[in-house]
Image: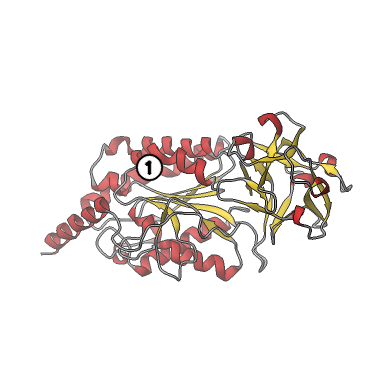
Amino acid sequence: MRGHILRWAGALAALLLAVGSFTGARTAAYAESNGGVRVMPLGDSITDGITVPGGYRIGLWQRFARDGYKVDFVGSLSNGPATLGDHDHEGHSGWRIDQIDANVAGWLRAYTPHTVLLHIGTNDVIQNHDLANAPARLSALIDHITASVPAAEVFVATIIPLAGSAQEANVRAFNAAIPGMVQSKAAAGEHVHLVDMHAAVTTADLADGVHPNAAGYDKMAATWYAALKSVPGSIGDTGGGGTTSGAIHAVGANKCLDVPNSTRNNGTQLQIYDCDGGAGQTWSASNGRLTVYDGAKCLDAYDNQTTAGTKVEIWDCNGGANQQWQLGPDGAITGVQSGLCLDVTGASTANGAPVQLWPCNGGGNQKWSLT
């Protein structure tokens, strides 16, 4: 009888995985962007939250809010309850590794996440889809993510257990390849981190043999949170105001916004240079301002101008409109009053290229991330 029930539950779960979430309307992303560190929950229905709309994202968000982290979930899908403060994600019900891989570059271009939470492979197991090569497909997916957003922190989870014994054996075989895979990529300089999610959840935490119940999802949330806190900068800094700080990267060029020689002189024009972690590349974002390292100087449009080609400089923080900026979910840093974007002239990637304001046209030279 138990085996019959498990087979029935597995069939139902597979149907749900294929059909997708039946709860929670999906709306356009961006609506809930709060300027915090962009985190992309990426995967299948376990990321979406079948059985508990919002899934692990609920408990994870609540931990962020409790501890003062300012995080912006990003993705093209949106669902979950009001207790989930930001509903955006890339959890595609029924999708395998190859299906995520076929679309991930576009999502990463659109949302430029600083942190990616990857839990994928369950549908490969359930569908018995070329399991021998599933680890290789996961490795290729991780490589495509790190190539698209090289400055991003990518957290790769082992997949959670399945109730069926034969499927669970395949889960364990798949998971066994992941630690060495992640270790080799990290050793090569990629920002890739292992999360042992399989150990965090038991079959008793599953609502239907595949998807966690509320308690299981909260165990996932706790595990993600511990992993994120172990990597400095992956979810920004705490401090009540939710300030994020670090380097502003030109996404396409892998260069950083730099104050030459770390000078604090008013009128210093900003440039891009290789990211070396110097004080002149350390910024914080708070209340619409981008403030350089000592908190006393702000990113400023020269003489409060709003014309194309205006130099971008630093000046004393005086709250002027020319110091008000927003870092949008598309990665553009926009002068709030002007509609102009922070731009590298001529799309240059050479050290010392001046940073100016130009009409926002979506070019790669206007794509930035604050880490």
Q: Residue furthest right?
A: 265
As drawn, 269 above or below 3: above
Where the N terminus falls, by quadrant? bottom left
Q: Is residue 232 left or right of residue 353?
A: left
User: Measured from the top left, where is residue 32 in percent x and y?
Assistant: 52, 60
Task: Decide which of 61, 161 is in the foreground and name it.
Answer: 61
Q: Which residue is mark 1?
A: 100
Task: Decide which of 225, 333 is in the foreground and name it.
Answer: 333
- Residue depicted at 31% across the width and 63% down the height: 23
Amino acid type, label 1: Ile
Colour basis: secondary structure
As drawn, 13 above or below 67: above
Task: Decide which of 92, 207 is in the foreground and name it.
Answer: 92
> Which quadrant of the figure has residue 363?
top right
Q: How many marks?
A: 1
Task: Decide which of 86, 201 is in the foreground and name it.
Answer: 86
User: Measured from the top left, where is residue 112 in percent x and y?
Assistant: 54, 45
**Neighbourhood count class around disc 1 (C-alpha, 10 Å): few under 14, some 14–19, many 20 upward:** many
User: Measured from the top left, where is residue 261 in percent x and y?
Assistant: 84, 40
As drawn, 201 above or below 150: below
User: Measured from the top left, where is residue 129 in percent x and y?
Assistant: 25, 40
Q: Is residue 67 left or right of residue 160?
A: right
Give the structural element (helix, strand or loop) at label 1: helix
- Residue depicted at 25% across the width and 60% down the height: 209
- Residue depicted at 36% across the width and 46% down the height: 175
